[in-house]
């Protein structure tokens, strides 16, 4: 069951039922020890451990106790919750604040015990309790945290492939924005055209076409800025997307009002418009993100080449014997045997 399928036992939603898979139970005394540890938690209304199924059925007050408190109590008793690890690539991150926001969003999900995000590759790794949370919860949490999404098939993408895909996506938007912005700049500053002398009412004549072109830039090239700003606004937070949305939005709203009702601006028969400002800001920010994405792609490629150099196996010394095992199985405290000329596998 996922988070939303956990039934409330009272109308005030102060009681919920959880069923946690356990590890390490061997006898009735184990069950009693876990039950005693859980019953002692504040907010624990009832706790029953099924030795045969290796599960703990709990009724808790979510206002007084959280899942990590329950897991800590079980571990302190000498047992553990049956958890799993998985990873996926998060798309849409651009800065360190994005990384921390994604981590916080994942950690806040009931059933997620730990979460970490690699800002260089965009890879997220989480440890979770199966049955309490799943892909749908993670996708919703990331969508609510900002303009973030999980790779389509829910797997870790090749770092270079992921960054190259993001670069191509941003480059396409930049090319579209740059082409339209050039037209807007020419229309806004006709003096740039050799031999062309615009009439006095030029701003009124060109106003509507500039409005339409600028709106196209905002919708098709700058939509990620406004989606991100709106998502954060609902959470009473702000980031660079908020700044971009406010700056470009203010210039666009003012210019649209000047085109629609020039009479609102006393003493100005043809008030100036700033559509070029809106389009130029979006284009320049996209250019910056495109260059950043290209640099991150090179970084991801370097990381991949470095990881390819890592040995796949290691020799662990136990009881005087060397045991060959996967390098990923090496743990803190193990003694490794490394022969002359070999690379250290950790």
Image (cartoon, helix red, strand yellow):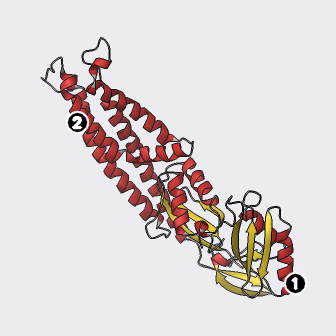
Most extreme residue toward the front, as rendered?
A: 11
Q: Please, is residue 89 above or below residue 265 in the view?
A: below
For marks 2 and 1 on the same chain, the one whose residue lies earlier in the sequence: 1
Q: Which residue is mark 2?
A: 183
Residue displayed at 70% across by 75% down: 20
> Is residue 142 toward the left or the right of residue 224 in the image?
right
The quarter in which the N terminus is drawn is bottom right
Residue 29's label in the rendered image is: 1
Which corner quadrant holds the C terminus? bottom right
Q: Is residue 256 visible?
A: yes
95 relative position to 173: left or right: right
Estimate the x, y position of residue 187 in percent, counting from the top left.
21, 30
Observer-nearest residue: 144 or 23? 144
Toward which corner of the image does residue 7 lie, by quadrant?
Answer: bottom right
In percent of width and height, residue 270 lies at 25, 18
Q: CA distance from mark 2 to mark 1?
A: 78 Å
10 w.r.t. 273: above or below: below
Q: Is residue 121 visible?
A: no
What residue sits 21% from the left and 34% below the top?
A: 209
Q: How many marks?
A: 2
Q: Which disc, if any, is residue 194?
A: none
């Amino acid at each position: 069951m996922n988070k939303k399928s956990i039934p409330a036992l009272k109308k005030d939603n102060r009681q919920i039922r959880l069923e946690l898979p356990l590890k390490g139970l061997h006898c009735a005394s184990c069950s009693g020890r876990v039950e005693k540890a859980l019953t002692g938690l504040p907010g624990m209304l009832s706790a029953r451990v099924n030795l045969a199924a290796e599960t703990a059925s709990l009724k808790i007050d979510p206002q007084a106790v959280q899942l990590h408190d329950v897991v800590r109590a079980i571990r302190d008793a000498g047992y553990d919750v049956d958890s799993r690890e998985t990873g996926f690539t998060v798309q849409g991150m651009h800065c360190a604040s994005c990384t921390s926001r994604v981590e916080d969003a994942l950690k806040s999900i009931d059933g997620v015990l730990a979460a970490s995000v690699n800002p260089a590759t965009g890879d997220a790794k989480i440890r979770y309790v199966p049955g309490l949370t799943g892909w749908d919860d993670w996708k919703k949490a990331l969508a609510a945290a900002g303009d973030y999404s999980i790779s389509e098939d829910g797997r870790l993408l090749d770092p270079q492939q992921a960054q190259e895909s993001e670069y191509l996506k941003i480059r396409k938007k930049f090319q579209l924005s740059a082409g339209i912005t050039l037209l807007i700049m020419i229309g806004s500053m006709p003096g740039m055209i050799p031999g062309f002398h615009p009439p006095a009412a030029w701003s009124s004549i060109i106003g509507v076409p500039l409005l339409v072109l600028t709106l196209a830039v905002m919708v098709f090239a700058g939509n990620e800025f406004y989606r991100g700003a709106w998502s954060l606004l609902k959470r009473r937070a702000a980031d660079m997307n908020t700044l971009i949305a406010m700056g470009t939005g203010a210039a666009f709203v003012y210019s649209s009002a000047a085109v629609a009702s020039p009479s609102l601006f006393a003493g100005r028969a043809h008030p100036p418009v700033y559509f070029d400002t809106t389009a130029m800001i979006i284009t320049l920010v996209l250019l910056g993100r495109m260059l950043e994405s290209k640099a991150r792609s090179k970084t991801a490629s370097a990381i991949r080449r470095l990881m390819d150099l890592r040995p796949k196996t290691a020799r662990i010394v136990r009881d005087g014997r060397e045991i060959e095992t996967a390098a990923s199985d090496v743990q803190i405290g193990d003694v490794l045997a490394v022969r002359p000329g070999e690379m250290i596998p950790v």
